[in-house]
Amino acid sequence: MSSEEIKEKVIGIIADQLGVDAKTITRDTDIANDLGADSLDFAELMIVFEEKFDIDIVEEDAQNITTVGQVIDNIEKQLKTK
Amino acid sequence: MPKRVVVTGVGLVTPLGCRVEEVWRGLCAGKSGIRSITEEPLSVFRAKIAGICDDFVPEDYVSVKDTRKLDRFTLFALASAIDAVKASGLDFSKEDPFRCGVITGCGVGGLGEITRQQDRLRNMGPGKISPYTIPKIMANAAPGQIAIHYGLHGPSYSIATACASANSAMSESFRSIRLGEADVVITGGTESAVTELGLAGFCAMRALSERETPPETASCPFDMKRDGFVIGEGAGILIFEELEHAKKRGAPILGEVLGCGATTDASHITQPDAEGVYPAEAMKAALRCAALAPEDLDYINLHGTATKLGDLAETSAIKRALGEYAYKIPMSSTKSHIGHLLGGSGGPEAIFSLLTIRDGVAPPTINLTEPDPQCDLDYIPLTARQINARRVMSNSFGFGGHNVCVIFGKYQ
């Protein structure tokens, strides 16, 4: 899966989960502050990413994620080492 | 002087539809909302029929995002509340939010979500459980979400008295307004237990009808052929409001809440006492609370679930409570149309009681073609009847031995 494909899929998932317009989401979008996700929304998002990409996002990494770009980077890194 | 309490708006979600007038017309025309269970994981049980709210579209009421965070029972309650508030004309931005509360009933909570997350826990491990699990399954999610939706800061809670939950909630709401604690309480009941665990559990008790018959004829309270209740899902929400508060804002008044009464069997956790001693005391307590004599009642919306023992017990109880008048008063079970909505059942049944008063028409007990000789009261079999209903009583009895009766009257 190319970086571009991963980005598109991640943004699609976020838009669907949080009920926001995908066009407003970029790499720099802050999931909590810009999209209004609360701690439960954020935890649910991580589970959905894990399922849709068949990966495991470790707790320590998840705690440091705030932006959409960080999600994409984390998933890309994991898919490479798979 | 205790305050008077009136009903200024109602909303519901039932197997016969989600619009009050449409459901009401269906009931009076003798329609049934029961169908075969064809959904894959639910079709393996001995009970093959249920009342399922096929017309319910949660997205008509909340965002797609919220439909994922709220269990079906909460969505039923919230949707019904939104319709009820709309009908009442209430604008909560003009109300003191600390004088407005939410007290609803629910037997269990998010039974479907419990099973879904338990499956994930077993199959995928502890890290894959949805963080929404607990806020979805808790029974008080319904009043909590309704309060959030409208920004209400008065008392709110959920009551669990199994199938009497909605009536218990209405009783507490009535008391709260009567004592001057609140001006408006959003009340009623909700349940969504037509799920794997719900069906499996009730089937294991042999509580559900297992009749192999056209689904719409299966729920047959007080009939010889009855063999258990038909499980249903849905909600009924009512706006209880202090009379002067309602008058001041020119609210539509559907009827008045006159009294309520509750007792407990304290004998068996599920089996009703065949003599109906304690439900009779609940009816008498409701009459005392409303300062009425048995003859003042014009109609009873029955608990009438179509279990062998339950229908007999309720029949005995009515005779005990009303004496000779038991043989003269018309009564019907609307569970014959929509099944048993468990903790939600009292909600729609209260609405039907109020509509009986409004229109002077009592819905029939459908499928009562072979009356049980031991059930010898006037259950309004098969066809609706014109009655002058000034005061009506709605009965609900729950596992745990909870008996709760609420009396409504024409507002005058």
Image (tube, helix red, strand yellow):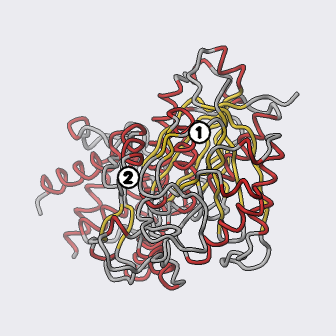
Residue at horizontal 65%, vertical 71%?
B399
Q: Quadrant of the N terminus of chain A?
A: bottom left
User: Quick one: label 1, few (<14), some, or many (20+) residues within 10 Å?
Assistant: many
| Nearer to me, B391 or B387 | B387
Percent x, y of residue B336: 45, 61
Query: Where A54 falls versus B341 (above or below)?
Result: below
Residue B381 relative to residue B178: left or right: left
Image quarter for residue B283?
Answer: bottom right
Q: Is residue B85 visible?
A: yes
Image quarter for residue B120?
Answer: bottom left
Query: Where B410 falls versus B59 (above or below)?
Result: above
Read off the residue under disc 1.
Answer: B147
Q: Secondary structure at mark 1?
A: helix
| Nearer to me, B215 or B384 | B384
Image quarter for residue B379?
Answer: bottom right
Q: Quadrant of the C terminus of chain A?
A: bottom left
Q: Nearer the viewer, mark 1 or mark 2?
A: 2
Residue B40 relative to residue B403: left or right: left
Q: Earlier in the sequence, mark 1 or mark 2?
A: 2
| Nearer to me, B332 or B112 | B332
Amino acid type at image mark 2 = Gly
Q: Secondary structure at mark 2?
A: loop
